[in-house]
Image (cartoon, grey):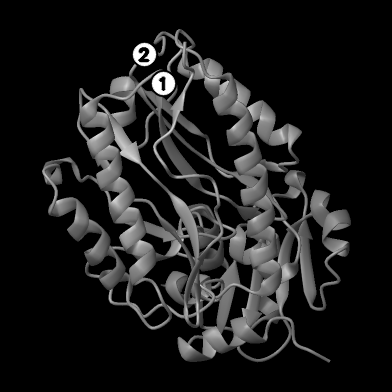
Amino acid sequence: MTDRFADLRQVAIDLKVDAVALVPGPNFTRAVGQSFASHERPFVLIVPAKGDPAAIVPNLELGSWAQVNFVGAVYDWRDQDRYQPAFDALAKDLHIHSVAVEGQVMRVFVHHALKSAMPQLTISDGEKAISGLRMIKTAADIAALEAAIAISERALHHTLDQVRVGMTEVEVEAILVGRLFAEGAEGMAFDPIVAAGDNSARPHAHARADYQIKAGDALLLDFGARKHGFAADITRTVFVDHASDEGRTVYETVLAANLAGFAATKAGVTAHEIDDVVTGVLEASPYGARIRTKTGHGLGRDVHEAPYIMRGNHQVLEAGVVYTNEPGLYEIGNFGVRIEDDVLITTDGCRSLTSFPKDLMIVGKS
């Protein structure tokens, strides 16, 4: 019988700890095959290097947990009784002295509950190794990403067809979000960014209800659908009614950097090398002072996950990695341009999972 947690056991062995502990999130979902919410009730999966796994499960989730077909001890608890007795019961049965956790995900109160039950327990951050299990995408992972991306691109086509001078960013955002769900999204990968004019120069801008889009504005849309547990992440920058000479030149510079990133990508290259090529194109332009971000990040169940495509990260990238190629130039008070594609690294190069056109686009012509 296949051990569904074999890779997590190997992580524990590699990290020289007795067990790995997961809480609801992408790694948890991957491990058990079902998504559970992270809320005020602690929910913990513990996979030891040897022996049966165990889980602390809120009583109200037992019905859903039964669908996981979990083989191992389950310690459930009710709100009225509080959760610490469940941790204490687990500690009596599961004799471990060290555990690796997801440092970016596990919350302090869960950490404290583990330590209260097992004062001798050494808790270490195993985030890199645990999340690293998701870095190489399977065929099913890639199919899910492609489904999310296709939904996103259809929604973007529809949205851009509706853009007009005088609309607010919030109005454009509402069209985009509505269309994502109309096209089959199960959720949004993240709160979308819809930013026009000077707002487009803020890489993580929020849509404004009090700004009406003007002729000549850059309009940046960064968003993604979620499908089958995987997230798309796409950015396109268009110009409304017309583009200035400066807008065209900045856009072509960012596009050149994006294309250079594709040319530099293949199995065996490092994250540093890709970013160095992409950022180098921007630095060699007259707009180097407008660089504010790295080239990109890994993409999968999380919108931002390893590997991070940046100088100084000498991690070698293997076939099956998916990352975002998203160079940008931003001048506060003026405008910004970002072009973002989702890229699959292959044995002989790479393949763009996004297909939305990248030639400079004018929308909302009067």
Relative to 50, does residue 131 appear above or below in the rendering? above
Residue at numbered disc 1: 240
Viewer-proximal residue, 267 or 99? 267
Viewer-proximal residue, 205 or 95? 205
In the drawing, does residue 164 fall left or right of residue 8? left
> Of the residues shown, which amino acid type is indicated by label 1?
Val
Place of residue 23 in the rendered image (x, y in percent of width and height, measured from the top left)? 61, 61
> Of the residues shown, which amino acid type is indicated by label 2?
Ala
Relative to 174, does residue 281 appear above or below in the rendering? below
Instruction: Quadrant for residue 307, please give it.
Output: bottom left
Residue drawn 55% across the image and 58% down it: 110
Relative to 359, does residue 331 appear above or below in the rendering? above
Viewer-proximal residue, 62 or 89? 62
Place of residue 365 in the rendered image (x, y in percent of width and height, measured from the top left)? 46, 16
In the drawing, does residue 338 fall left or right of residue 118? left
Relative to 244, does residue 147 appear above or below in the rendering? below
Quarter placement of the N terminus: bottom right
Residue at numbered disc 2: 215
- Cβ–Cβ below 8 Å for labels 2 and 1? yes
Q: Secondary structure at mark 1?
A: strand
Place of residue 334 in the rendered image (x, y in percent of width and height, measured from the top left)? 22, 24
Q: Residues within 10 Å of mark 2 (few under 14, many from 20)?
A: some
Residue drawn 55% across the image and 66% down it: 114
Q: Which mark is residue 151?
A: none
Residue 82 showing in the rendered view: yes
Residue drawn 59% across the image and 72% down it: 137
Residue drawn 65% across the image and 57% down it: 146
In the drawing, does residue 13 fall left or right of residue 212? right
Q: Earlier in the sequence, mark 2 or mark 1?
A: 2
